[in-house]
Amino acid sequence: MEIFITGIGSGLGEALALEFLEAGENVYALSRHLPRSLEGFENLHFLSLNLFAHEKIGIAMEELLGDVELDLAILNAGVVGELKEMEETSLHEIEAIMDLNVWANKVILDRLKRRTVKQIVAISSGASVSGARGWNGYALSKAALNMLIRLYGEEMPHTHLTSLAPGIIDTPMLRYIMEHGDPHRFPVVQRLREAPKMTPRDGARLIIDTLPRLLEYPSGEYLDIRQLH
């Protein structure tokens, strides 16, 4: 398989890349840095890129992918931001989150639309629909990502798209929220602390096992992996 992934520097993205590479698949990745766990794989094609630099994404994708026809693209790169009230969250902070979680993916999707791609999965979050207090720009961005995928689903008839909430995965991002979030102001922090969590590798394996099932749903759908198992 030929697989394109963004945000492989840590957490779920790193685990997904490792699972595919160990299975012998060809992985094409854009990320700020390459973790040590992924070094030395001949089937990894990697370019370092900060996806906030929207103007560089198209050129990087052409250099990375050439004329490769993709079986799968996983849009994983994302940022959470600080857990706090909407009133305390500046427009600048929200714009920064949207720049990576939504607009970088729009640029990527515009490029993928010109290619042969069988399946695209954008990593969303339950925060996109829960509206839990404190998620501010993150929830807004993931809700917008869900709609972005729905809109492209209408425009890309030969590609199947899904916006997928992957469940609760023990990543550096999640640990930061649990350690620094105020559970009294933001009840979601306590819920996350008490909830069962997957390791990144287990989360990656669950997503990979679920990929064929996503094709049973209409293209452009938002799905929560916890409701599929």
Image: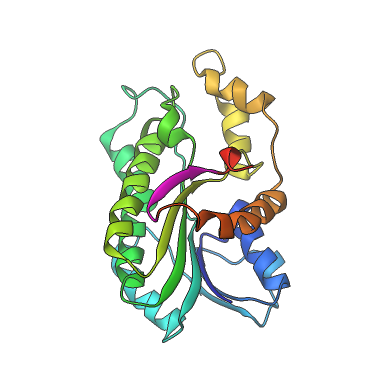
Q: Quadrant of the N terminus?
A: bottom right
Q: Provide the residue span drawn in magenta.
A: 219-224
Please report the residue visible at 57 percent of the width from the left and 58 percent of the height from the top. 211
- From the viewer's side, name the closer residue of 9 and 115: 115
The picture places residue 83, in percent across and down from the top left corner, at 47, 29
Give the vertical position of 191 relative to 48 (above or below).
Answer: above
Residue 186 appears in view: yes
Looking at the rendered image, the quarter that the C terminus falls into is: top right
Residue 34 or residue 25, whichever sits in front: 25
Left or right of 39 in this view: 56 = left
Q: Residue furthest bottom?
A: 67
Residue nearest the viewer, comparing 208 with 200: 208
- In terms of secondary structure, what is the magenta stretch mainly? strand
Lateral position of residue 218 relative to residue 197, left or right: left
Above or below, 8 against 143 in this view is below
Quadrant of the image occupied by residue 170: top right
Indicate the position of residue 213 as horizontal and vertical percent values: 57, 55
The picture quadrant where one finds residue 161 is: bottom left
Examine the rendering and report whether any part of residue 36 can be seen.
no
114 falls in the magenta region: no
Rendered residue at 68%/55% (across/down): 205
Up-down relation of residue 188 to residue 11 (above or below): above
Residue 135: x, y in percent? 43, 30
At x 43%, y 73%, the residue is 117
Q: Residue furthest front?
A: 216
